[in-house]
Structure formats: structure tokens, C-alpha cells
Image: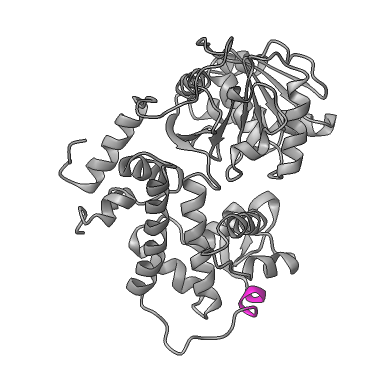
Amino acid sequence: MSSPDTPTAYAEQLKTEAAARTLAGWSFPPPEAGNSHSRTIKKVGVIGAGVMGSGIAHWCAACGLQVVLRDVQPEFIARGLTVIRGLFDGGVKLGQQTADEAEQAMGRIVTTTGWDGFSDCDLVIEAIVEDVAAKQKLFAEIATNVGPLVLLASNTSALPIEELFGNVPQPERTLGIHFFNPVGRMPLVELIMGRQTSEATATAALGFVKQLKKSPVICRSSPGFLVTRVLFFYLNEACRLWEEGVPTETIDNAMREWGWPMGPMRLIDEVGVDVTDFIFGEMAHYFTARFQRATICTRLLAAGFKGRKNGASSGFYAYVGREASLNEAAKLMDVGPMSSTPTATEIAGRLMAVMVAEAQRCLDEGVIKTPADVDFALLSGAGFPATRGGLMHWAAGKNTG
């Protein structure tokens, strides 16, 4: 990769190169008999009609694919269809498609609370709750209702792929396809290859991601993969800083000044205090020796503060409409002021050092191939400031600004 003159130009170049990404350089197990042929994805089954499942179903249909959307209760399906209809209506208002095109795409989605319509799917994507046991049970059930060559994917953001597919025949057809929320707007998809994922499976999934006009980054299965792992080490360190007595607004202002569009405490509210606390627990489980888990999210949840996600209205901040102010009840949970509050430069230095160190470990472990892949993934999936070029680009000293 040539070195553009500015960090912003480097960030733009990464987007161009991501669109042409291939599986070159990745190794795969020997192909299984009968499962080494190439395939094109034409029909997708999506399981789970929540925010992510509805978003995936909407975008697949918008890109011309047939979709069957499943959930366990009719009311869940109805809610998901309402979300999908709203997404199409929004696209029409923005001029992304005509009303006729949106109606045709909506017509490509069928729904079920059983397994009708799944037998001729090319790919089934699971988008249910982040729970290993629930996903294992679901995939065992899916395997009895689809053919042996149907690709099986999880949209998990953090759980190692191998743990989810332990009871699935033909595990070479399994992998992770991690979309980011909101699916229609976020360009990045993490393509997660498990130890048994075949080259044919990865090739078909890569083609599917490109069919959806998304930019893939390819990872080996590992807890948190790349983006979730690096981002939540950073968010946990921000919480630890908060627990040391640094105020919410001081942390957030420092990171916005550094270039992030949103400070880490506000980001936790947007992601959801519940989701953040769950992923902190997963990181502590898998990286016991060095993930010193902050406790503030657990305490916020116990007090009923879930952040802004799913209609909740308080976390580190309290929200009224679009207005946000500090949550006074959350402030009472801190340990009091530090004897010496760190400067914005010191705060940014500490938090970015954690992020860089974790990204480097992902490279060293072979979770991700190149520093440029790290840079693209965090620019596209985590909001890393393009004016810094990219995380590893900045860390290498190429950006002196």
C-alpha cells in the first residue's frame, strides 16, 4: 500500500482497497467431500426479528435477495416488519429508492414462526440474544431443518464461532458474519472464520457481503474478534478512569478534542449499559489475566440505568428528547474527585494506548492480517477519527498532527 500525503487521504484509500479484499493469504482446512463447490447466495434466512435481525432482513431484500425472517412469536415478527417498513419508508424519503422499488423489496420478505421457507435457503444468519447456550441450541435445531450444504452464520459480535456450532453437522459450512448497527448505514462487516470454516464457505460469504455493497474485513475467530475486542478494552479503561474520580464530561471532552465524534461514556449510553456490561463480562472471562473489569456499568444496571438504547433514558447521562445532561444519580456512584485530575492529553494518551496495545495483540495472534485492516475496521466500524488516518497508522507515527 502506497503512503498518501495526508491521514485523511490514507483513510479514503483504505475504503477503496477494502472493496477489493480477497481471501489471499488465509489458510483453510482441506475441503470436505461434497462441500467444496462455489455458490451464489440468492435466498437468506434470518432468525431473530429484533433490531439486528430486522436490519439484516431489510438490507438483504433491498439488495435484491429473497428473505425468510423467523422469530418465535407473531408479535415479534409484527414488530420486526414495522421496523423494516420504517427503514424502507426512510430510504424513499432520502431518495435511496423509489416507492415502487421499496414495495418490491418488501415483497421479497416472508415471515414465519416455524421453519417454512428455510429448506431452500442458501444461507441462514442467526441474530438472537448473545448467549452461548441459546445459540448452540438454535444451531442444532437449524441443522435439522436445512440441507447439509446450507451455510450457517452467526451475527455475534463477541462470541468465538467454534463455541456456537459444536453440535452442527458439516461444521466446515459455519462462520460469523458480524454486521454493525444500523445495518443499512454501516459499511463494515466482519467476516469471521472459525477453525473448521472451509475456503468454499468463506468465498461464498465474502461474495455475499459484497452483494450487499458492504466492505468486509476478514478475521479469525477469537473472543470479540477485532472491533468489539479493541473498542471494549478502550471503553473499560474509560470506566476505570471514571471510577478513579475523573468526571464523565472530562473524559468525554478529552476524547472529542482528540478527534472522536463521541466520548466513551456517551458511547456506552448509546450502545446500551446492559450490552456494555455483558461484553465487559465476556472480555473478563476470556482475558482473565489482563482485563481488569470496571464495575460501574454493573452498578448502573442495578440502579435501573440502561443508557439510551431500547427506549431507556438514563446512563452516564440523562436524556430528554435530543437533549443530554449529566445523570446526577450516576455521579453519586463515583469515588469522589481525584487528588489531581489528569489533563485532556493524559486522558487521551492513556485510553489510546490501551486501544493500540489490544490491536497489536490481535495482529500478533493472527486474528487480523495487516495494520491497514485494523485501521479500516476501526474507521468504518467504531468511528475512529479519519483525520488521524487510522489507529495503527497514527500509532506508527505517520500522523504527526
Q: Residue at x 65, y 40 (%)?
A: 163
Residue 331: image quadrant is bottom right
List x then y, in percent, for residue 127. Answer: 67, 35
> Which quadrant does the C terminus fall into?
bottom left
Residue 316 falls left or right of residue 352 = right
Quadrant for the N terminus in the image:
top left
Asked if residue 89 is positioned above or below residue 286 in the image, the reply reads above
Q: In this view, does 275 lie to the left or right of 371?
A: right
The residue at the point 55 percent across, 39 percent down is 182
The answer to whether residue 387 shows anywhere in this view is no
From this viewpoint, which residue is outermost toward the bottom? Answer: 339
Q: Where does residue 387 sit, x and y in percent of width and height?
A: 28, 51
Give the image location of residue 359, x and y in percent. 40, 52
Residue 137 included in the magenta stretch of the image: no
Front-most of residues 379 and 312: 379
Left or right of 356? Residue 286 is right
Depicted 385 relative to depicted 341: above or below: above
Is residue 44 something that shows in the picture? Answer: yes
The residue drawn where x is 54% and y is 35% is 179
Along the line of sight, which residue is nearer the eye, 320 or 248? 248
Q: In this view, does 396 lie above or below 237?
A: above
Q: Main secondary structure of the magenta part?
A: helix
Q: For this rendering, which residue is in front, 333 or 155? A: 155
| Badge count | 0
Expressed as whole percent of the image width and height from the top left, the position of residue 70 reads 75, 26
Is the image coloured rainbow, by chain, by secondary structure, or in one colour?
Answer: one colour
Residue found at x 71% / y 64%? 301
Q: What span is in magenta?
A: 328-333
> Is residue 137 positioned above or below 230 on the image?
above
Where residue 56 sits, quadrant-wise, is top right
Q: Which residue lies furthest to the left in this view?
A: 5
